């Protein structure tokens, strides 16, 4: 790894020299814009919009456009003259519990390595943070931008997470927040049962980037000139379930490997879902069964009578001469 920043952690009167490294890396597959006909790279020139001339990178400065359209031009020297004390210092402001920080504020993550003879005070701060069970709130300036940051311990190393400023967090302004939307108790019970059936210890290693793997396979197939394997089609398990309770119940059963949902939750939901006329309807099969008994007896008598009549006819036909039977048949 290559360090991207070098400075010191200011911890009271203690100064700890550190180097900063990016703790994460981007694994996305990157593409270039090319000419579809021959694969040639498409390049862009930096052209001034006023004189139309190409501008060298060394001649490019930063400009801030004012509301009236005027542009304020700032050079690297202007940024270097700003009185930014956190340019080479990570200033510890206070210590708090990590649970007090909303993860929405986290931005980027960095590793801190002790620089030179700073290993001993580095370990001192690390062990003190671990023993206190807290994190340090700091300020740091990286690439001409000052940020809040959190220092914590991970696998024996100080890790710094830069954070957004409070006014950079957007407030959710959605219409449904002003509506009085109520959920049924049985739906909440079933949803909690689903959460319970899917609860496990988080292991990030069991998850994969399916899109990146598919893209890698596509590039390899394109390179070798072979066929591109198509992903298997997912079987359609029917139309979309409109009833929320049915969807939750099916989800619980699927999460449990096809087993039935929690008996208490299932019984309560079944009773709550049942219409008011359902209880009397349960006695209907008994009445129907009772009514079917005479009908079955009548049918049996009818069948017996039919068999008797057929037997008599067969017997009578057998006593007649064959010629007469043939003539009647003709």
Image (tube, rainbow, N blue to C red):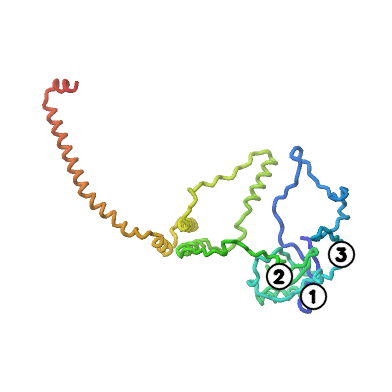
Mark 2 against mark 3, which lies toward the viewer? 3
What residue did someone put label 1 on?
Answer: 15
The secondary element bearing badge 2 is classed as strand
Instruction: Using a 10 Å C-alpha cutoff, classify the residue at mark 2 as few (fewer than 14 neighbours), some (14 to 19) or many (20 or more).
Output: many
Dot placed on the residue nearer the N-terminal end, 2 or 3? 3
Up-down: is 318 above or below 126? Answer: above
Furthest residue to the bottom?
A: 13
The CA span between labels 1 and 2 is: 17 Å
The secondary element bearing badge 3 is classed as helix
Image coordinates for residue 59, horizontal then vertical, percent: 88, 55
* In the displayed structure image, the side of residue 250 where residue 215 appears, left or right: right
What residue did someone put label 3 on?
Answer: 78
Which residue is found at the position 70% from the left and 54% from the top? 27
Up-down: is 71 above or below 31? Answer: below
The secondary element bearing badge 1 is classed as strand
Dot placed on the residue nearer the N-terminal end, 1 or 3? 1
What residue did someone put label 2 on?
Answer: 150
Dot placed on the residue nearer the N-terminal end, 1 or 2? 1
């Amino acid at each position: 790894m290559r360090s991207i920043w070098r400075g010191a952690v200011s911890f009271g009167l203690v100064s700890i020299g550190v180097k900063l490294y990016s703790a994460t890396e981007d694994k996305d597959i990157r593409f270039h814009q090319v000419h579809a006909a021959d694969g040639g790279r498409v390049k862009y020139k930096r052209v001034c919009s006023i004189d139309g001339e190409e501008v060298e990178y060394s001649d490019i400065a930063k400009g801030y456009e004012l509301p009236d359209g005027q542009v304020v031009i700032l050079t690297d020297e202007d940024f270097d003259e700003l009185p930014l004390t956190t340019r080479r210092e990570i200033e510890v402001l206070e210590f708090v519990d990590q649970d007090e920080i909303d993860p929405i504020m986290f931005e980027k993550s960095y590793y801190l390595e002790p620089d030179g003879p700073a290993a001993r005070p580095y370990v001192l701060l690390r062990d003190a943070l671990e023993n206190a069970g807290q994190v340090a709130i700091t300020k740091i300036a990286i690439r001409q931008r000052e940020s809040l940051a959190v220092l914590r311990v991970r696998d024996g190393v100080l890790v710094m997470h830069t954070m957004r400023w409070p006014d950079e967090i957007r407030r959710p302004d959605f219409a449904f927040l002003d509506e009085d939307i109520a959920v049924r108790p049985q739906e909440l019970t079933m949803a909690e049962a689903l959460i319970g059936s899917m609860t496990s210890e988080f292991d990030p290693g069991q998850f994969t980037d399916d899109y990146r793997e598919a893209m890698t396979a596509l590039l390899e197939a394109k390179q070798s000139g072979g066929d591109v394997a198509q992903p298997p089609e997912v079987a359609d398990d029917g139309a979309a379930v409109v009833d929320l309770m049915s969807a939750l119940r099916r989800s619980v059963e699927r999460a449990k490997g096809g087993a039935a949902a929690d008996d208490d939750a299932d019984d309560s939901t079944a009773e709550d879902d049942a219409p008011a006329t359902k209880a009397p309807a349960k006695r209907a099969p008994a009445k129907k069964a009772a009514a079917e008994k005479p009908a079955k007896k009548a049918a049996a008598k009818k069948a017996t009578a039919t068999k008797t009549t057929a037997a008599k006819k067969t017997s009578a036909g057998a006593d007649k001469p064959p010629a007469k039977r043939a003539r009647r048949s003709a």
